[in-house]
Image (cartoon, helix red, strand yellow):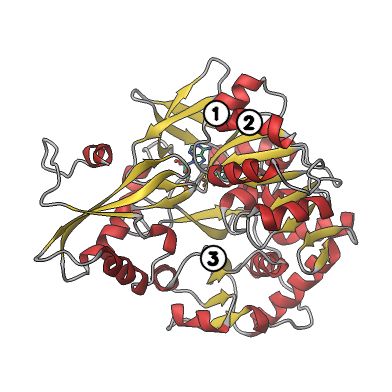
Amino acid sequence: MHWTDEEAARYRALGYWRGVSFGALLRELAGRYGKRPALIAAERWSFDDLDARADRLAAGLHRRGIGPGDRVVVQLPNVPQFHQVCFALYRLGAWPVFALPAHRSAEISYFCEFTEAAAYICAEEADRERAPGTPAIPLAELPEEDPVELPDRDPGEVAFLQLSGGSTGLPKLIPRTHDDYIYSFRASAELCGLTPDSVYLCALPAAHNFPMSSPGVFGALSAGAASVLAADPSPATCFPLIERERVSIAALVPPLALLWLRAAASTPHDLSSLEVLQVGGAKFSAEAARRVRPELGCTLQQVFGMAEGLVNYTRLDDPEELVVGTQGRPLSPADEIVVEPGGHLLTRGPYTIKAYWRAEEHNRQAFTPDGFYRTGDLVRLTPTGHLVVEGRAKDQINRGGEKIAPEEVENHLLAHPSVHDASVVGVPDPFLGERVCAYVICEGAPPPRTELRAFLTARGIAAFKIPDLFEYVDAFPNTAVGKVSKLHLRERT
Ligand code: AMP
Ligand code: DBH
């Protein structure tokens, strides 16, 4: 399930795993950076504020019976309370399960049921309907009380469950430990040159692994830097924040980077503080990548990562052709990379998981017997050790950085009485990289497309999973083995 004893000993000996828990780390940071700004949104929280308020919330949740090993589904917008909740749960030894703000009742009820969650921490009172069987705690009712003494956690234990985009019917849960995750964001902060004078802009949803840890808000905290939490990633929201807070580094997915490039051409806002724009989550085209420096006046950093662990970065001093034309190289000297024939990327290392949580059958395919994770990505290695992402072997759609498991959407479509069969594929899109297309075989007269869309919305799935296109067909093209040929379907549009 976890790293071997030999691996763990090596990662400790090399200083990657420091044996410090999240709770202890925040205490250490508050001691060092005290009144300096940590989180900036409508409210401004210092390191001391975050530390004290995490203690007060931990006390309140403790009195509500939440304790070590309990799972708590967390679905919050980009507000400082998100990080307060994280650290409160870490101090209790309870595990946040990180849902995204876009998730609706289908996803939330699944997370709550599958993890047997003790609570669901949500933005609004009305959100509690998404998880009828689980006690909900809306943001306005976070229970803060006078701090209580809590034992420190073992840094080798699981700290939280992160989500995988998944390629099978239901999303997989990724168990990350204190030691492995803290290593990944501390090393990332160092690689990105963060100092207490840096200002990180969290424009993507804070629960996503990229803005959480690459280096993300956690990496910024670990370096004593402030993070600005944007309510949404639009230029209209973010450009004034960059100007006002003198943001030095921001992270985006490719379609947003394109939007920012377009808006920067005519913005009245001063973006000159921006030193680094990180782009990741999906492949950033070389044509767009080339525009970043001249049009935004900052250094591009490509980031190719996964919530399962491995993160690759182009280095800030890499030559332009590597920054523009590759997705970077591994974060850690201890990351092991294998590129199998056909380009299949496998990896293991000090912050890559060995198994998904409670998914024994899937784990047998997703990991090799010697502990490598099969990423499902197809890559090419350059002589410099950089990776170029060339495709994908897994059945997943990457819609501008939002990952969709076709099988999950197909299963929802199959619940419609007029749908005899469905096959969901990604089709090329100049802006998003891929869009979602559903091929549908109907029983009787095909329903209007708006009806299928409304049906999926009513099933309570996240809007980004609802197909952009519906195509009615009489039959799917078959491969030799009789399985639907997804490659063939992609080529038809
Ligand atoms: P997940 O496992 O859900 O965290 O999604 C991670 C996946 O996103 C990777 O395995 C890649 O398929 C994709 N991905 C992330 N960053 C990039 C990137 N910079 N270029 C291409 N694909 C990426
Ligand atoms: O797509 C991802 O999951 C991702 C991208 C960049 C990620 O998890 C990360 C960096 O840490």
Label 3 residue SS: loop
Q: Quadrant of residue 6?
A: top right
| Total marks in image | 3
- Dot 1 and dot 2 residues touching (CB under 8 Å): yes
Q: Quadrant of residue 160?
A: bottom right
Q: Which residue is mark 2?
A: 291
Callout 1 amino acid: Glu
Which residue shows up at 77% across the image and 55% down it? Answer: 240
Give whichever of discs 2 and 3 has the lower sequence position.
Answer: 3
Q: In this orientation, does residue 333 appear?
A: no
What distance separates the C-alpha of mark 2 from that of mark 3?
31 Å
Give whichever of discs 1 and 3 has the lower sequence position.
Answer: 3
Label 2 residue SS: helix
In the picture, measured across the screen, residue 300 lies left or right of residue 429, that is right
Q: Which residue is mark 1?
A: 287
Callout 2 amino acid: Arg
Q: Is 151 in front, or is 230? A: 230
Q: Quadrant of residue 145?
A: bottom right
Q: Is 27 in front, or is 391? A: 391
Q: In this orientation, does residue 477 appear?
A: yes
The mark closer to the camera, 1 or 3, is: 1
Q: Is 45 in front, or is 344? A: 45
Which residue shows up at 51% across the image and 26% down it? Answer: 387
In the picture, measured across the screen, residue 346 lies left or right of residue 223, that is left
Label 1 residue SS: helix
What distance separates the C-alpha of mark 1 from that of mark 2?
7 Å
Disc marking residue 101: 3
Callout 3 amino acid: Pro
> Residue 476 placed where, x, y %?
14, 47
